[in-house]
């Protein structure tokens, strides 16, 4: 079975978008401590991208 690569990027983009939406929705389920950890990780990532 072959996969048409023309459609794969679109499919992957849609999948990533859905995954991000699910992760954002799930943030509401986290405790304040867990949210703080997520925030710190995001800040680390953002800082490493700007350096």
Image (cartoon, rainbow, N blue to C red):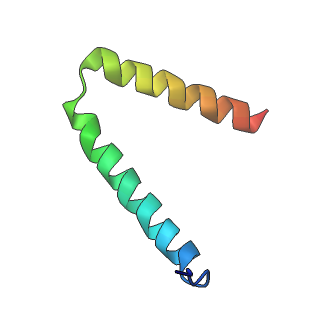
**Picture quadrant of residue 49:** top right
Residue at 50% x, 67% y is 13
Q: Position of residue 41 (x, y in %)?
A: 52, 25
Q: Position of residue 25 (x, y in %)?
A: 26, 46
Q: As displayed, is residue 18 above or below residue 35?
A: below
Residue at 52% x, 31% y is 42
Q: In which quadrant will I find the C terminus?
A: top right
Q: Position of residue 21 (x, y in %)?
A: 34, 54
Residue at 62% x, 32% y is 45
> Would residue 43 be found to the left or right of residue 25 on screen?
right
> Would residue 51 be found to the left or right of residue 2 on screen?
right
> Would residue 3 be found to the left or right of residue 27 on screen?
right
**Picture quadrant of residue 36:** top left
Q: Give 44 or 3, whichever is nearer the viewer.
A: 3
Residue farthest toward the front in the current orientation of the protein: 1
Q: Give 16 or 33, whichever is nearer the viewer.
A: 16
Residue farthest toward the left in the current orientation of the protein: 29
């Amino acid at each position: 079975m072959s996969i048409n690569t023309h459609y794969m990027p679109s499919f992957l983009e849609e999948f990533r978008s859905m995954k991000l939406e699910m992760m954002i929705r799930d943030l509401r389920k986290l405790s304040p401590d867990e949210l703080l950890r997520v925030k710190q990780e995001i800040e680390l990532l953002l800082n490493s991208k700007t350096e």
